[in-house]
Amino acid sequence: IGTNDYASSFCRVDCIVAGNLAIVRELRLQKPEATIVINGLLPRSKSRTDVAFADDFAEINRRLSCIADTLDDVVFFDAAYLFWTEDGGLNRTMLPDGLHPGEVGSRVWGQAIVDRVLKIDGGL
């Protein structure tokens, strides 16, 4: 539940947050001992000032972070910073089409996820 759902006309902030919470609950039922990592939404707008996406995505990520903070063994990981340039634009090396991580973006994002997971409970 995320950026593609947001692009549909029927699913916005509340819907995406509720969908992610439902996934967390289902994962908790299936794997009660697991630490669950919620990955924040990545940018898909042309710049940080593109209010149509950036503000809503920031709100979604803020709410997902709050959910993770209130639940045991749930961690929020926000990698959006990896995809912005210093001047607030979208890094086209990381997101060549403005939406999907390219080869470099996937590698950098994947390594950031691994690094974050290894910090959970002292690593694997």
Image (spheres, grey):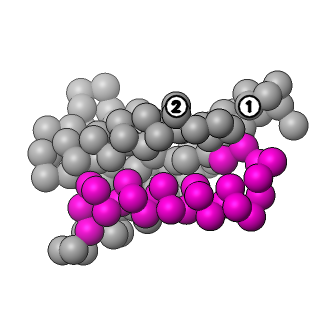
Residue 69 badge: 2
Instruction: In the rendered view, tell whether residue 86 sits above or below residue 109.
Output: above
Choose mark 2 or mark 1, whichever is in front: 2
Amino acid type at image mark 1: Ile
For the C terminus, give its image quadrant: top right
Q: Nearer the viewer, residue 26 or 79?
A: 26
Question: Height in image: 92 above or below 71?
Answer: below
In percent of width and height, residue 114 lies at: 71, 40
On screen, residue 74 versus residue 90, left or right, reads right
Q: Is 12 in the magenta? A: yes
Please report the residue visible at 82 percent of the width from the left and 25 percent of the height from the top. 122
**Which residue bears the numbered disc 1?**
120
Per the picture, the main secondary structure of the magenta-coloured stretch is: helix
Decide: is 63 above or below 21.
above
Q: Quadrant of residue 26?
A: bottom right
Q: Quadrant of residue 23?
A: bottom right
Please provide the residue range marked out in magenta. 11-36
Residue positioned most to the right: 124
